[in-house]
Image (cartoon, rainbow, N blue to C red):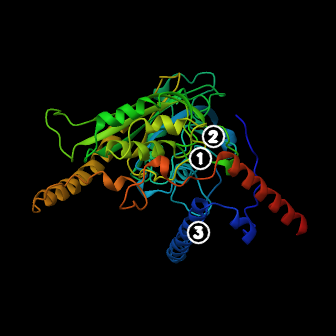
Amino acid sequence: MNVVKIKKNKFSNSTREELEILDKSILIDKILQLEAHNFQLKSILSKTLNSSDKKSKKPEFTNRKFDFSKHHKRHIFLKFYYLGWDYHGFMEQENTIDTIEHHVFAALKKSCLIENRETSNYHRCGRTDKGVSAFSQVISIDVRSQLDPNNQNNLDQELAYCKILNRLLPKNIRCFAWSPVLENISARFDCKRRTYKYFFPRGNLNLDLMNQGLKFMIGSHDFRNICKMDVANGVVNFNRTILEASVRSIKENLETTSGYDMCELTITSQAFLWHQIRCIMGVILLVGCGNEKPEVIQELLNIEHCPKKPQYNLAHEIPLNLFHCEFETNDWFIDKTELEEVIKALQEEWTFHRIKSTMIKTMLLNLPETKNTNFQSDCLLRGVESKIYTPLMKRLTCESLEEKIKHFTKKQKIEVKKETNI
């Protein structure tokens, strides 16, 4: 993959000259990040002050350091599900502790399954963004073992990894399976295919038109117009291969249809680009409601005909789920007793969300009737929609890939010059 290396100094402030070369979408992202950062710092400060008050009242204890040199290690896969709508994404971040990865590593270290992240030979399969959930997120990692390295096949005698972690994790993050793997196997690089699901209400959407559009995406294409170009992190190759992509209704009785019927997009590839699936849904929703023809997908994938991405809204992040990650190993160990606890936790989440959903639907159905009430899917597109619809191919466009590279290269030179003058 071609890579452009952008040198960054996280401690330096942006100058007016640097900001003037950025396009509108990047400036909006920067403002939103700063606002979120400010809010998170206030929350962290508040939590720190409250916890320090509580700690001051407790007697001090001296903790003996765990001696990892006296214990064996083994390399394993750990499989998690998590409901991501209350978190700021999977990856650890400097300005917040509300990430999945933070809680996973906190549990791993507190249980003394690992000494630290740096020496744990860690890889993650998927990098889900803020609000996105997962049913099958897999990590590879070296963990403490109570079995001799020459005799680690009796998994029933091994540490109860899932049970240990689940006692320390938040209730909407659960580990439900683990698998022994070779030392050189990586959850990131050895994943054969990744499948995402995107759940949505039917509303006034035409699923047949949506499927016609999705068929144009299957195969290898340059998806620079159907993703968020991550040039700042050196990504300049946007070729990906979609293996499967389709939408369907998931209701049991297909004889009658309603705007309240739940549907799902299922899409599979070996790897995806940043915001690729949310961009796909953003376009497919326009096709489903009749604003665009299915063939608009062909036009967006034709880079010679359409070298610049038209401006359109991302689909909402909450319905997206990293549903399945496929590896060569199928040797997953599941503790049946712990599985019951995991099922109970998910059922509890389902119960209260279904109660809320049923209550709201009952209220909706008891409102006075109007001619058209199928607006259920309208809220899935982020941003403000114009009252007068503008076709995608007639909209303002973002910068081309070449322009983005040029701007970030110029920014790099400015930063190098600024560092030289310090």
Q: Amino acid at mark 1?
A: Lys
Q: Amino acid at mark 2?
A: Tyr
Rendered image quadrant of residue 205: top left
Q: Which mark is residue 155?
A: none
* Residue nearest the observer in this picture, 180 or 372: 372
- Can I make out residue 117 in this image? no
Residue at 47 percent across and 32 percent down: it is 217
Whichever of labels 1 and 3 marks the residue nearer the N terminus, that label is 3
Q: Is residue 408 left or right of residue 111?
A: right
Q: Tell me the CA gap for discs 3 and 2.
A: 30 Å
Which corner quadrant holds the C terminus? bottom right
Q: Is residue 76 left or right of residue 68?
A: left
| Residue pointed to by mark 3 | 34
| Residue pointed to by mark 1 | 308
* Callout 1 secondary element: loop
Q: Which mark is residue 122?
A: 2
